[in-house]
Amino acid sequence: MAATADRPTRVASDLFDSAVVEAAKENRSAKQQLEHWARVGKSVCARQTASRHRVEAALAGVLPVEHLSDDEGIVFDSEVQSRLDTRLRTTNLGVVLAARGVTTVALNEQGELTEYRPDGTSASV
């Protein structure tokens, strides 16, 4: 069987930085560390055990988190952290808040403090 070639991909910089640190401890490259984490995560997610179903129920809000075992709680916390990290990277809070009628203040592209209003206008602060 022929070996498959690697495919270029982008990885969140914070995850890559963590992989560099952990890889040094494990005598791996950052790429090898990311692959290791991905394989472990894939294996954990693929296991359809009673514990996995309980974690999924807690994530769905059907099972109270305090009913999880310590090990299930670790998986639950990891899932929540991963989802939060993804949501934070992909959500434009300014757009979300503007839709709710909230004025925000942030740095513009020139590094100037700017007020962004829900009607789409903005002004330097």
Image (tube, rainbow, N blue to C red):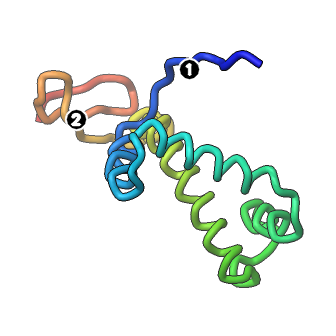
Three-letter amino acid code at the position of disc 1: Asp
Q: Is residue 56 left or right of residue 40?
A: right
Element type at mark 1: loop
What is the x, y in percent for residue 103? 33, 40
Which mark, residue 6?
A: 1
Mark 1 neighbour class, 10 Å CA radius: few under 14, some 14 to 19, many 20 or more? few
Tell me how far mark 1 sits from mark 2, CA to CA.
45 Å
Q: Residue at x 82, y 70 (%)?
A: 51
Identify which amino acid the numbered label 2 is placed on: Glu
Q: Choose mark 1 or mark 2, whichever is in front.
A: 1
Disc number placed over residue 113 in the picture, else none: none
Residue appearing at x 39%, y 40% in the figure: 29
Q: Secondary structure at mark 2?
A: strand
Q: Closer to the camera, 19 or 112?
A: 19
In front: 54, or 65?
54
Quarter holding the C terminus is top left
Q: Where residue 63 sits: x, y (%)? A: 80, 73
The residue that mark 2 highlights is 115
